[in-house]
């Protein structure tokens, strides 16, 4: 069993869905978890973790805001002195066929999914280098790997995360910073209306989080 006692994790977009499932499982395995989200949902997840005997902090930071991200990282280091795990999970949808897609929506999706992940990763990178340990997970998607109607912008951003992961895995290797992508399919608010009701019942986010554990433990690949 993967033991995360002593580890500190930041999970972005952790107020619901996959992020919540990730945060709960990491805490259950012993990690102290920063639950990042924009609203009160982060506080509710922190309460769940604490009620189960874990340790957690809420961070209401937008991944697109550099100052807020830096403050989240600084607050984490002040409280817990290290950051071992970053799960880049924050995301939004603005689905439209390419012919009807405003470039403003394209930019927004890229800003949240790609630049948000890059910004959070860069904010923890020097800490992980200095401590000689880090585990980073990017949340990509089958839409990036295979395409999906109405998701040209989303698919582009998600595939770009794979390229980012590949390069960071090379640059982080000598510091034992291991970087991976997770391409989940799960029943969340973001997949309502995309997956059938039958599929939604069978695809709990908890199943994906079990897979995440293999990417954040001491023996994670890169």
Image: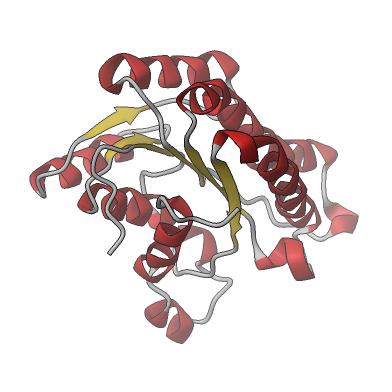
Q: How was the colour assigned to the protein in this rendering?
A: secondary structure
Q: Residue at x 59, y 18 (%)?
A: 66
Image x and y of residue 187, in percent: 44, 69
Q: Residue at x 45, y 81 (%)?
A: 197
* Image coords of residue 1 (percent x, y): 27, 64
Position of residue 175 relative to residue 15, above or below, is: above
Q: From where the camera sits, is residue 148 visible?
A: no
Where is residue 5? Give x, y as percent.
23, 44
Q: Residue at image x 39%, y 62%?
A: 209
Q: Residue furthest bottom?
A: 198
Counting labels gives 0
Q: Nearer the viewer, residue 179 or 181?
A: 179
Would residue 8 appear left or right of 87 to someone viewing this image?
A: left
Residue 172 location, quadrant: top right
Indicate the position of residue 39 as horizontal and vertical percent values: 37, 33
Residue at left offset 33%, top offset 33% = 34
């Amino acid at each position: 069993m993967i033991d995360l006692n002593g580890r500190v994790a930041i999970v972005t977009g952790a107020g619901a869905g996959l992020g919540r499932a990730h945060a709960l499982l990491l805490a259950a395995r012993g990690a102290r978890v920063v639950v990042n989200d924009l609203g009160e949902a982060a506080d509710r997840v922190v309460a769940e973790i604490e009620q189960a005997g874990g340790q957690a902090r809420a961070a209401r930071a937008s991944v697109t805001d550099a100052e807020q991200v830096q403050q989240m990282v600084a607050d984490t280091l002040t409280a817990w002195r290290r950051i071992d795990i970053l799960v880049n999970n924050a995301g939004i949808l603005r689905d439209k066929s390419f012919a009807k897609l405003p470039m403003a929506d394209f930019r927004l999706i890229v800003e949240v999914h790609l630049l948000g992940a890059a910004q959070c990763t860069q904010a923890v990178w020097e800490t992980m280098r200095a401590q000689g340990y880090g585990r980073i997970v990017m949340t990509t998607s089958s839409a990036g790997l295979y395409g999906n109607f109405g998701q040209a912008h989303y698919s582009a951003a998600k595939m770009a995360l794979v390229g980012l992961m590949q390069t960071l895995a090379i640059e982080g290797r000598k510091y034992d910073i291991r970087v991976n992508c997770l391409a989940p399919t799960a029943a969340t608010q973001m997949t309502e209306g995309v997956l059938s009701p039958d599929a939604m019942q069978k695809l709990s986010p908890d199943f994906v989080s079990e897979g995440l554990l293999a990417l954040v433990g001491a023996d994670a690949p890169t």
